[in-house]
Image (cartoon, helix red, strand yellow):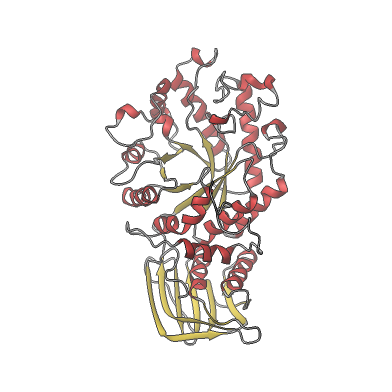
């Protein structure tokens, strides 16, 4: 292989560098089971991993889900989702479905070694190899925020990395940056994106075979801005909408029927925009000012919360999707011993709502300070009957530990979060993907320079300093 490792590391890999399949500037592959969009993705991957010096033509051929160059063949073993064989006569990928075939080709192109890149003498080889692979976790998502200061090319890089590293879902959360038709004031006048700009991100994710999960925080974080900066996307434009929120504006007012109506309209727009899918992320974290207005404080807080979330759940499930919510408002910190546990349900006793909630809700358990052992909150939520996804942030040991727990506990899946640390995720995406994809708990390989090599293959910055790499600042002052 060209780099020192394959990313993410496959379940089984054997290589014999003494035997080579050699090819040049023009290659034809027989392909079965790929959509036109996936085939175009494969052609682009081949071209870029050949340093822009070899073109791939795809013609129909074979049965099931397969990709073959030359005369070799391969077959799936028990438990495989894809298998690769390379020998002197060619290379072949066989898979269980279209997504797995794309995964296999994403591994295959990493085996391409350039031998001569001189124009007119282009020469490449793939050493004899055998790969058998399957993911350890079926639901593998990554969450990206679009802030007013976000550069779309960074989200493009992030989506390309997520697709190449075999994620299944991308969650897009808009922080005052989505132009809603139902209420234009939900977007900043001078810092939102156009629908065409955002649609290009949705299309990019889908071109990698990933589902786009729309997200709108429909409880806390109602400002669509970070709390420490004092901005409120709606109320800085239209104070007459104040009754939609608790007095400080941080939390939606769950007693106001107009709140429910607006949130429903927001969800409908996002679902239509992001296209078909099975999930909607409702947020629901850090609602510190919940039930403080003159209407909400007349209700029993946890009953009002359960009633509202169950109503949203019924609506979301009515669209063929399942709601995802952050876990923290539904657990009490006081119920756990010493340790770095995130649980905010002591506030207004919102944790009492947990037993009243619809079990179609997926709990997203974010524990960013957790490092090792068993994450006790995931077990609690699962034992209560909730499908639960673990959600690490940007610390490598946090990612490794929670990913290992997801596998040991049989959790529903993993959501990698990035928040305002997107450059760190871009740098460490290969490490995170290895934790999510593979079976073992050992630290997967990671090299920032090899990550940079992969990023250059996946995103063409065309020599732009700003668009290259993962951090704008070479020198921090």
For image coordinates 57% across by 38% down, the residue present is 318
Is 323 left or right of 464, judged from the image as shown?
left
Picture coordinates of residue 48, whole percent (x, y): 60, 70
Depth check: give the residue in front, 436 or 133: 436
Depth check: give the residue in front, 449 or 84: 449
Picture coordinates of residue 36, whole percent (x, y): 65, 66
Q: Is residue 217 above or below residue 441?
A: above
Depth check: give the residue in front, 53 or 324: 53
Quadrant (top left/top right/bottom left/bottom right) for the N terminus: bottom left
Is 416 left or right of 59, judged from the image as shown?
left
Badge count: 0
Quadrant in the picture for residue 192 = top right
Depth check: give the residue in front, 254 or 315: 254
Picture coordinates of residue 338, whole percent (x, y): 27, 33
Q: Is residue 55 above or below residue 102?
A: below
- Residue 98 visible here: no
Q: Is residue 77 above or below residue 27?
A: above
- Residue 153 visible here: yes
Quadrant in the picture for residue 241 = top right
For image coordinates 61% across by 80% down, the residue present is 28
For image coordinates 56% across by 58% down, the residue present is 469
Quadrant in the picture for residue 182 = top right
């Amino acid at each position: 292989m060209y780099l020192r490792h394959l990313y993410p590391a496959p379940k089984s890999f054997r290589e014999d560098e003494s035997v080579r399949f050699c090819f040049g500037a023009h290659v034809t592959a027989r392909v079965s089971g790929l959509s036109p969009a996936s085939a175009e993705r494969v052609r682009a991957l081949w071209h870029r991993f050949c340093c822009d010096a070899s073109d791939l033509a795809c013609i129909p051929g074979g049965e099931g889900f397969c990709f073959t160059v030359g005369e070799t063949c391969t077959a799936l073993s028990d438990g495989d989702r894809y298998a690769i064989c390379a020998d002197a006569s060619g290379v072949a990928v066989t898979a269980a479905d279209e997504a797995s075939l794309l995964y296999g080709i994403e591994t295959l192109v990493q085996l391409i070694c350039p031998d001569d890149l001189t124009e007119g003498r282009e020469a490449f080889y793939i050493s004899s190899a055998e790969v058998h692979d399957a993911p350890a976790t079926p639901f593998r998502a990554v969450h990206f925020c679009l802030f007013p200061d976000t550069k779309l090319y960074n989200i493009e890089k992030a989506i390309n990395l997520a697709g190449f590293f075999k994620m299944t879902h991308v969650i897009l959360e808009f922080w005052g940056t989505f132009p809603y038709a139902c209420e234009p004031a939900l977007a900043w006048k001078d810092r939102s994106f156009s629908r065409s700009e955002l649609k290009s991100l949705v299309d990019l994710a889908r071109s990698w075979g990933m589902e786009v999960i729309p997200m709108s925080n429909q409880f806390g974080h109602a400002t669509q801005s970070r709390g420490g900066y004092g901005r409120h996307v709606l109320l800085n434009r239209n104070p007459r909408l104040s009754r939609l929120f608790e007095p400080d504006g941080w939390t939606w007012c769950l007693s106001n029927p107009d709140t429910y109506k607006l949130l429903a309209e927001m969800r409908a727009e996002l679902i239509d925009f992001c296209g078909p899918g099975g999930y909607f992320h409702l947020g629901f974290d850090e609602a510190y000012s919940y039930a403080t207005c003159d209407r909400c404080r007349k209700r029993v807080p946890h009953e009002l919360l359960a009633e509202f979330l169950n109503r949203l759940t019924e609506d979301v499930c009515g669209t063929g999707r399942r709601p995802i919510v952050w876990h923290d408002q539904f657990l009490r910190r006081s119920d756990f011993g010493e340790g770095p546990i995130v649980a905010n349900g002591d506030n207004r006793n919102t944790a009492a709502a947990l037993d009243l909630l619809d079990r179609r809700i997926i709990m997203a358990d974010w524990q960013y300070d957790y490092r090792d052992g068993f994450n006790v909150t995931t077990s609690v939520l699962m034992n209560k009957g909730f499908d639960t996804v673990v959600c690490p942030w940007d610390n490598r040991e946090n990612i490794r530990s929670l990913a290992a727990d997801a596998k040991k506990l049989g959790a529903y899946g993993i959501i990698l979060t990035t928040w305002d640390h997107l450059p760190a995720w871009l740098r460490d995406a290969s490490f995170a993907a290895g934790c999510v994809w593979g079976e073992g708990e050992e630290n997967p390989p990671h090299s920032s320079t090899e990550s940079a090599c992969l990023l250059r293959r996946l995103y063409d910055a065309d020599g732009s300093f700003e668009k290259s790499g993962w951090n704008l600042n070479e020198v921090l002052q």
